[in-house]
Amino acid sequence: MIKAVRIKLLPNNKQRTKFFQFAGCSRFAYNWALDKQMANFREGRKLQSDYDLRKEFTVLRNSGEKPWLLDVSNNVTKQAIKDLCIAYKNFFRKQKQNGYVKYSPKKLAHLARIGKTPTVYDMNGHPKFRSRKNEDFRFYQDNVKIQFTRTHVKFEQIADSKRKNRKKANWIRLAEKGRIPVGVKYINPRISFDGKNWWLGVGFVVKYKLKPMRGLKFVRKQPMHPYTKGVGIDLGVKDLAIVSDETTVKNINKTKTVRKLKKKRRRLQRQVSRKYQMNKKGDSYCKTSNIIKAEKQLLRINHRLTNIRTNHVHQATRAIIDRKPRFVCLEDLNVQGMMKNKHLSEKVQEQKIYEFRRQIEYKAHWAKISVIIADRWYPSSKTCIECGHVKKDLKLSDRTYVCPVCGNVIDRDFQAALNLKRYGEAELSKSAS
Ligand SMILES: [Zn+2]
């Protein structure tokens, strides 16, 4: 199994400067290749292969026309070109899919307004130029050459000098110790900048082998731990999750801290747009240093909000898994369908419901706990736990379930969790027989 980790880097000033340089070269190579391919397309030629482009780029690199390219490891630019070719492949693959919409109606309307005819570049999913303006700072490191210790990671060509005592600069400090195993095979190391910090994302192989079975995921024959009963989890918008063992995961967005931050953010957003309006010159907007300052502040708030939310989900899922249930049963939420609903979509996004499910799945996998995803049409909240009656006309606003057959009165979400637990038990015994 592949485990992926995202870890914060603590570069010193020299290393930070180098990172920006690397990211710049990566962006340059990507845009250079995109420009080439678009020219090929315009003039009716076949698109160049990844190999061809890279060969041509090496000629450019060695020509000395752009001397700064020589300061950066070849692997950085190589991967950028590869990435572009993959982006193109994905673009063509998507076009072949059923029901593919070539141009988004919004885009077409916008182009009509400014009097431009749509080009290939405006098509849905067409690779875009990477830009400094969008804070696009990221690059790749070679997965064979990268090295780790408990505390540091080694990148290529950060040090200017090849002298031995200067090579220390190649080692960048990690913000967390010992999270990445030393001396294993690493997969796809990527470094990115989020506006404040540099991060390293890397995968490595972990020895677990669990086969998914029939609707069930990750089933083991004999559990290794003294498991308690299984749990059913109902995910929702009011509370993030209701667990059948009578615990609730609260909605973090209703806490004072988050509400205050959101208020602050709203104010800042208004401030920024007002500032843009004030400094408008004719038709073009311009960035003053005050705008840059405010935008930085805004970015910080956004980071903080995301961190609070992600942390909350991590803690909640960890707590559930640490109780060592025999299995976890979740409903198959139609997140995409929920995103279409204007009012729900913001709440679903804020709650990170999808992230919750993803985390439960992989954490359960690590702990060797089975995960069962209930059928999308399984009426978990409409079924009476006592008698099994399915109440078809249950509305979203009905918070309490009153059974017309047996008179059972119960909290709607808690009942859903109990039903999911029962569903999980049934599925497990089915697969055991
Ligand atoms: Zn009933």
Image: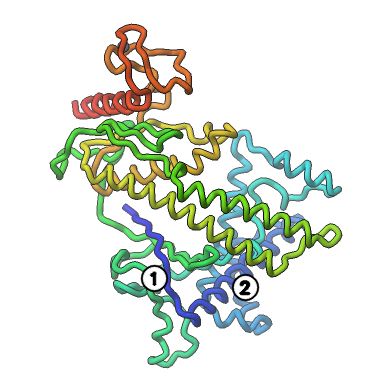
Q: Residue at x 31, y 58 (%)?
A: 205
What secondary structure is found at the residue carrying circle 1?
A: loop
**Type of amino acid at the residue the image marks with label 1:** Val
Which residue is labeled 2 in the image?
57
Give the crowd class for mark 1: few <14, some 14-19, many >=20 residues within 10 Å: few
Q: Nearer the viewer, residue 384 or 251?
A: 251
User: Ligand 1, what quadrant?
Assistant: top left
Q: Residue at x 50, y 57 (%)?
A: 303
Q: Residue at x 37, y 57 (%)?
A: 4
- Residue 34 is situated, as x and y percent measured from the top left of the image, at 66, 62
What secondary structure is found at the residue carrying circle 2?
A: helix
Q: Nearer the viewer, mark 2 or mark 1?
A: 1
- Residue 155 is situated, as x and y percent measured from the top left of the image, at 43, 76
**Along the horizontal axis of the image, is 178 left or right of 144?**
left
Q: Residue at x 39, y 85 (%)?
A: 168
**Type of amino acid at the residue the image marks with label 2:** Phe
Q: Nearer the viewer, residue 245 or 173?
A: 245
